[in-house]
């Protein structure tokens, strides 16, 4: 894997995902028991519509809060990114999306 072109943006992206998505309702879904009948098969839905709605709502709310913080309190935003970056130290570096 190649290092990202902009390491600071890569760090920020991973921290935002941790803060806005990973540490939200998806954790409760992830922490549940493995489905004994579907065995995690990709052809089976493993998240209900209500769970997905809660996950996305939480991510949007947290992203909104982070973006407002970035705009209105850059130092507070930098502290949040530093905090979120502690969760993702072993994550893969981001790659450019394929179009």
Image (cartoon, rainbow, N blue to C red):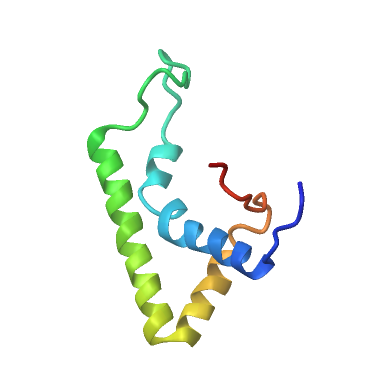
Dividing the picture into quadrants, the one containing residue 38 is top left
Q: Is residue 98 left or right of residue 38?
A: right
Q: Considering only vertical position in the picture, is 62 above or below 93? A: below
**Whole-percent x, y for residue 29 in the image:** 38, 39
Q: Considering only vertical position in the picture, is 31 above or below 18? A: above
**Whole-percent x, y for residue 41 in the image:** 47, 18
Query: Please, which residue is most extreme toward the top here?
Result: 37
Residue for point 41% across, 21% down? 35
Dividing the picture into quadrants, the one containing residue 3 is bottom right
Query: Please, which residue is most extreme toward the left here?
Result: 50
Residue for point 68% across, 66% down? 7
Residue for point 41% across, 86% down? 73
Query: Please, which residue is most extreme toward the right here?
Result: 2
**Whole-percent x, y for residue 22 in the image:** 46, 52
Q: Nearer the viewer, residue 79 or 92?
A: 92
Dividing the picture into quadrants, the one containing residue 32 is top left
Q: Nearer the viewer, residue 24 or 61?
A: 61
Q: Is residue 10 left or right of residue 16?
A: right
Q: Considering only vertical position in the picture, is 6 above or below 55? A: below
Q: Is residue 59 left or right of residue 76?
A: left
Residue for point 38% across, 19% down? 44
Q: Considering only vertical position in the picture, is 38 above or below 66? A: above
How many labels sit on residues?
0
């Amino acid at each position: 894997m190649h290092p990202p072109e902009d390491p600071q943006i890569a760090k920020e992206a991973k921290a935002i995902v941790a803060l806005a998505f990973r540490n939200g309702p998806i954790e409760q879904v992830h922490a549940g028991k493995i489905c004994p009948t579907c065995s995690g098969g990709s052809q089976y839905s493993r998240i209900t519509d209500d769970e997905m709605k809660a996950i996305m709502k939480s991510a949007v709310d947290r992203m909104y809060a982070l973006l407002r913080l970035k705009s209105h309190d850059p130092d507070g935003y930098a502290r949040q990114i530093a905090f979120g970056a502690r969760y993702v130290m072993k994550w893969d570096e981001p790659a450019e999306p394929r179009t």
